[in-house]
Amino acid sequence: MVDDITTRENGSIDRDEPDSNSLVLARGLNKSYISSGSKIEILRDADLTLRSGETVAIVGASGIGKSTLLQILGTLDQPDSGNLWFLGKNIFKLDPIQLASFRNSSIGFVFQFHHLLPEFTALENAMMPGLIKGLSKPLSKNLAEKILVRVGLKSRLQQQVTKLSGGEQQRVALARALVLKPALLLADEPTGNLDQKNSEQVHELLTELNQELNMTMVVVTHNMKLASYMDRRVTILDGKLVEAN
C-alpha cells in the first residue's frame, strides 16, 4: 500500500482516527456504479494519505477510477462508504452549505477542459472564487491580478477568454484555482488538450507554484513526463491505491 495507516499500540489498524500530521486522510473509500444492470466497483476499501506540500500523480489506464477518486477527494462526489479528513476534520459530516464553503476556500480545481465563463475576461474569471467567498470586489480583483501576472498573463487581464489561446485559457483556469491560495490543488488531465510547448509550460508552472505556495497537489494524468515531476506516482489496482513506477 502507498500510505501509512494509523496504528494502535497493539499493532492493529485504526481507520477511525485521523493522522494529525496529514493534510488529507482518506480511509476505506468504496465507490461503485450500476451499468446495464451490473454493479461495477471502482474503489474498494481504498486508502490515501496526502502530506502538506507533497505532489502525487494518479496514473494508469482509462476507466480504473482515477477521476472518480479525484472527485471524491475534491468533495464533488461522495463515496458509498469510507471517511475523508482534511486537517483532522471529517469533511463529509459538513452540511451542504458548509461543504461548499470549505471546497471554495480550501481546494482548487483544474480540468482538461477549462470550464471558464466565456462571456467574461480573464480577470473576471479569476475573481470568481473570491466573490463567491464573499470578499469585496476590490480585494477579489487585487488577488486575481496578482495570480494572473504570476502565471504570465499580465497583458491579457482584460481579454475575453474566448479570444485567448488554449494555453492561455488553461493559465486562467490555473489562476482561478489558486487565487485563494488553497491548501490542495486537484488537476484532472491539466495538459490533455495542450500542444507540447504549452504542456511543458504548464508542467513548469505547476512545479514552481507548488514550491512557492507549499500546496499539496494531486494530478490525474496520462502524461508520464508530468507524472515524473511529482513526488509520488500511484495507480488503482483492484480498487485499491498502490505505488506505480
Image: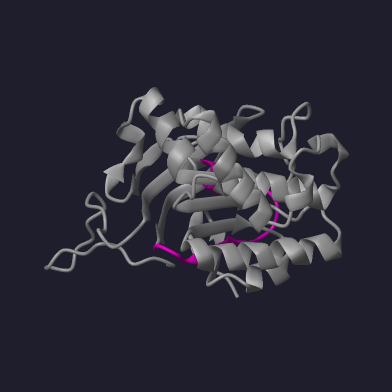
Residue 164, how many percent across, how many down?
A: 84, 43
- State whether residue 65 appears in this view: no
Q: Is residue 10 visible?
A: yes
Q: Residue furthest left?
A: 9
> What residue is at 56 percent from the left and 50 percent from the top?
186
Task: Answer above or below: position of 147 versus 105.
Answer: below
Range drawn in magenta = 51-71
> Is residue 34 one of those drawn in magenta?
no
Residue 175, position as x, y percentages in the image: 63, 48
Residue 209's quadrant in the figure? bottom right
Asked if residue 65 lies in the magenta stretch, the reply is yes
Relative to 131, say whether 74 is above or below: below
| Residue closest to the eye, 175 or 88 | 175
For the residue pair 64 and 4, the one nearer the viewer reads as: 4
Q: How is the image coloured?
A: one colour
**Quadrant showing the N terminus:** bottom left
* Horizontal side, residue 86 vs residue 67: left or right: left
Residue plotted at (73% across, 52% down): 154
Q: Is residue 128 left or right of residue 86?
A: right
Quarter-wise, where is residue 9 in the image? Answer: bottom left
In the figure, is residue 95 to the left or right of 219? left
Q: Residue at x 30, y 63 (%)?
A: 5
Q: Residue at x 27, y 49 (%)?
A: 88
Which quarter of the rendered picture does the C terminus lie within?
bottom right
Q: Is residue 44 above or below residue 137?
A: below
Position in image of residue 109 (x %, y %): 58, 44
* Residue placed most toward the observer, 154 or 99: 154
